[in-house]
Image: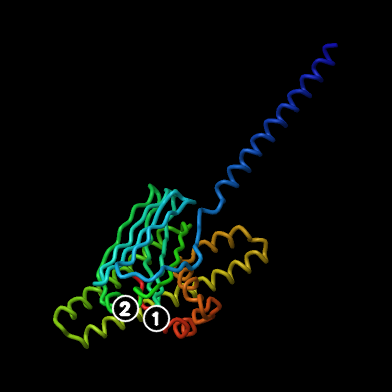
């Protein structure tokens, strides 16, 4: 009898161990799944705004992340781009909003920043380019927005900040030329801003194509997880330019292979990034 009880005890202990092992394994699997779950990302379709005699103003609710984005552009070229978004640990928040006026020119408002403790941003400026082009917005315009949380936070943020410094310097130089009534220098600074925007978009598209190629290779070798993470690294700038750029034509193509192809593809539509 004692021997029988001993056997039952050992069996019970083994059964309990198996149950505990299964529970721990299940918990780890759930934790792993949650840890690798993609951070929120979302993009709007192209939306049309009717003719207006006043400033451009859009306040957009980002329901998926309990956030918002607001854009205001005034006839004198002053603009304000602001918003909020929820926190995501160890990630950056990347958001772009594009405006396409009735002449087909595209302007992108872009922000990247730390999302660790929640997001609250506000950017403002004054652009002679927007002032000159404002009558084309009054007839009608299209707009689109896109946001995502970057996995490789620090690198993307540093890249954005460096580009932002260049934009701000050119904007200051353009303003100084305008105040001095130096029409030639002002035109040169506007052209430089346009070239910088084209270069940025070209680099974004070339990088995204490399990422897609890397994702394809990774998934072909059983590396789907790595490919999925890489797929979230691209900027939102390319997304919104494609959305509003392809309303009536394929002038802005997302299928490009070289920087020179990208620049020639967007030269007639992308005017500036702020």
**Tag of residue 233:** none
Q: Is residue 108 above or below residue 69?
A: below
Spot occupied by residue 227 in the image (x, y as percentages of width and height)? 59, 62
Q: Residue at x 48, y 68 (%)?
A: 46
Which element type, helix, strand or loop, lies under badge 1?
loop
Q: Residue furthest left?
A: 180
Q: Earlier in the sequence, mark 2 or mark 1?
A: 1
Alpha-carbon distance for marks 2 and 1?
Answer: 9 Å
Q: How far from the left and from the top, in percent, is residue 22?
A: 69, 35
Residue at left offset 45%, top offset 77%: 202
Quarter of the picture holding the C terminus: bottom left
Report crowding for label 1: few under 14, some 14 to 19, many 20 or more residues within 10 A (C-alpha). some
Whether residue 89 is situated above or below residue 198 in the rendered picture: above
Relative horizontal placement of residue 31, taking residue 160 as reference (left or right): right
Badge 2, how many Cα within 10 Å: few under 14, some, many 20+? some
Where is residue 114, by image quadrant? bottom left
Return the residue at label 2.
133
Count of residue discs = 2
For the rendered model, the colour scheme is rainbow
Residue 241 sits above or below residue 258 on the image:
above
Residue drawn at point x = 32 percent, y = 68 percent: 164
Q: In this orientation, does residue 198 appear?
A: no
Q: Nearer the viewer, residue 132 or 64?
A: 132
Tell me which corner region of the image, top left, top right, bottom left or bottom right, holds residue 154: bottom left
The residue carrying mark 1 is: 103
User: Which residue occupies the extreme top position in the image?
Assistant: 1
Q: Is residue 159 left or right of residue 233?
A: left
């Amino acid at each position: 009898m004692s021997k029988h009880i001993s056997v039952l005890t050992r069996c019970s202990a083994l059964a309990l161990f198996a149950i505990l092992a299964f529970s721990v394994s299940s918990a780890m699997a759930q934790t792993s799944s949650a840890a690798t779950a993609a951070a929120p990302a979302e993009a709007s379709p192209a939306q049309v705004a009717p003719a207006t005699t006043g400033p451009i103003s859009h306040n957009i609710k980002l329901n998926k992340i309990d956030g918002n984005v607001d854009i205001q552009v005034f006839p004198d070229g002053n603009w304000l781009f602001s918003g909020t978004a929820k926190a995501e640990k160890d990630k950056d928040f990347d958001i772009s909003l594009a405006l396409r006026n009735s002449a087909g020119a595209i302007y992108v408002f872009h922000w990247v920043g730390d999302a660790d403790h929640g997001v609250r941003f506000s950017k403002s400026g004054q652009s002679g380019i927007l002032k000159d082009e404002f009558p084309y917005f009054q007839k009608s315009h299209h707009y689109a927005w896109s946001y995502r949380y970057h996995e490789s936070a620090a690198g993307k943020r540093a890249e954005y900040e460096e580009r932002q410094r260049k934009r701000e310097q050119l904007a200051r130089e353009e303003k100084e030329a305008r105040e001095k009534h130096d029409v030639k220098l002002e035109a040169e600074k506007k052209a430089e801003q346009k070239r910088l925007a084209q270069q940025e978009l070209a680099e974004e598209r070339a990088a995204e194509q490399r990422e897609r190629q890397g994702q394809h290779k990774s998934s072909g070798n059983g590396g789907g997880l790595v490919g999925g993470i890489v797929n979230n690294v691209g900027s939102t700038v390319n997304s919104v330019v494609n959305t509003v750029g392809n309303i009536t034509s394929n002038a802005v193509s997302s299928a490009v292979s070289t920087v020179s192809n990208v620049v020639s593809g967007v030269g007639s539509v992308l005017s500036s990034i702020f």
